[in-house]
């Protein structure tokens, strides 16, 4: 497990272009919403007497007035957009299945679709353990995108079943039933925490299976995504300790990042250098979070390669493109043994 983490770290560091592209993609996805919100604020404040106090810091009276007449995207400008409250609010909205404005949902879908296109090249690059250059990277993206799209549709149905009906059943029907006659708030809270734990465990299990299904689809050049999903399920069931330990380890790294961000995240500034500091710290957090997400994928790929095949499964120096990473590794191993 530690070896998979170390290997994943090295593979991400060895391919900094992927991290830079991921950051630019994230920034590009957020920029239109920032510009729209800026226009709304500018139109609302205009040349009023509230403009200067609002620019100097938090003007609570103006903020409540703005939210009182806000619609669509403007309703997201709540106190939770400040500093460390942002990731906590996102986690809360996810686990509580809170609705989001339609524009944000559409943008998130497009952002996910672009990532789905890139994942084939990302996983292929990490599995080979060597540069594939732009032509090799985007060739892999093009080859695997239709396959990962089919896998994504299958995974989407499972996530919908969990986040929709299963979530409502656990935290609605079941929770109301077991707490109907409860008089102690502490007992009701413990029941809710327990049901959240059940929901989280099911979500993690599906997430692990989907992750390894994507890895097997790319590394083994699989064409059937139902077969890849079944293979991912078998891998998780046959290696429950290693896959769970690696998942928890990567999760703990993310928790440590959140704690660090909670310590250093600035609050509301008063313009000038304060705004710049807020922006830089926030972007550093985004970059670190993307690094951990890529490291998550690279370490899982490394674990799969080390657990299911011989030591030379990971590709060493160049072979013929566009064979799959598995085929390339086997050819290289045969050549080295001659």
Image (tube, helix red, strand yellow):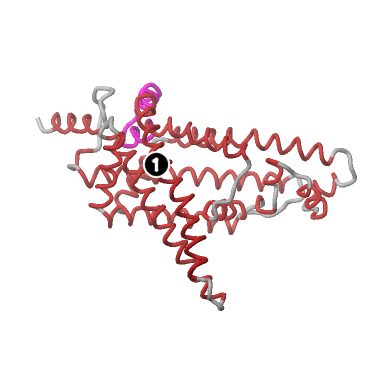
**Left or right side of 331 for 107:** right
User: What secondary structure is the stretch in magenta mostly built from?
Assistant: helix
Q: Position of residue 15 (x, y in %)?
A: 40, 35
Residue 89, quarter of the rendered image: bottom right
Q: Position of residue 141 (x, y in %)?
A: 39, 27
Where is the C terminus found, in terms of image quarters? top left
Q: How many marks?
A: 1
**Left or right side of 87 for 332:** left
Q: Is residue 137 magenta?
A: yes
Query: Which residue in the rendered view is the most extreme toward the right?
Result: 49
**Left or right side of 106 for 316:** left
Magenta segment: 121-140
**Residue at x-position 47% and y-position 61%:** 196
Q: Which residue is mark 1?
A: 155
**Residue at x-position 65% and y-position 36%:** 33
Q: Look at the numbered disc 1 and give the secondary structure of its residue.
A: helix
Q: Is residue 265 above or below residue 210?
A: below
Residue situated in front as seen by the camera: 113 or 242: 113
Residue 324, quarter of the rendered image: top left
Q: Position of residue 158 (x, y in %)?
A: 40, 45
């Amino acid at each position: 497990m530690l070896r998979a983490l170390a290997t994943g770290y090295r593979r991400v560091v060895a391919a900094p272009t992927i991290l830079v592209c991921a950051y630019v993609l994230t920034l590009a996805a957020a920029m239109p919403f920032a510009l729209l919100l800026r226009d709304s604020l500018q139109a609302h404040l205009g040349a009023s007497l509230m403009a200067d106090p609002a620019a100097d810091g938090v003007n609570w009276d103006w903020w409540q007035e703005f939210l009182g007449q806000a619609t669509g995207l403007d309703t997201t400008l709540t106190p939770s957009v400040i500093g460390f409250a942002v990731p906590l609010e996102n986690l809360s909205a996810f686990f509580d299945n809170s609705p989001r404005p339609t524009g944000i949902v559409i943008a998130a879908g497009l952002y996910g679709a672009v990532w789905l296109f890139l994942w084939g090249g990302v996983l292929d690059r990490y599995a080979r353990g060597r540069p594939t250059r732009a032509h090799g990277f985007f060739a892999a993206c093009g080859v695997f995108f239709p396959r990962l799209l089919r896998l994504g549709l299958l995974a989407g149905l499972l996530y919908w079943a969990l986040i929709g009906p299963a979530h409502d059943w656990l935290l609605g029907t079941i929770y109301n039933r077991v707490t109907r006659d409860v008089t102690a708030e502490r007992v009701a809270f413990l029941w809710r925490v327990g049901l959240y734990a059940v929901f989280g465990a099911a979500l993690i299990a599906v997430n692990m299976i989907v992750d390894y299904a994507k890895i097997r689809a790319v590394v083994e050049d699989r064409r059937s995504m139902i077969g890849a999903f079944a293979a991912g399920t078998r891998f998780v069931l046959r290696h429950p300790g290693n896959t769970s330990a690696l998942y928890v380890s990567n999760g703990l790294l993310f928790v440590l990042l959140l704690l660090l961000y909670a310590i250093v995240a600035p609050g509301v500034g008063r313009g000038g250098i304060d705004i710049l500091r807020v922006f830089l710290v926030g972007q550093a957090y985004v970059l670190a979070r993307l690094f951990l997400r890529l490291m998550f994928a690279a370490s899982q790929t490394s674990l799969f390669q080390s657990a299911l095949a011989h030591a030379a499964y990971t590709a060493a120096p160049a072979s013929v493109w566009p064979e799959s990473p598995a085929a390339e590794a086997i050819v290289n191993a045969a050549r080295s043994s001659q």
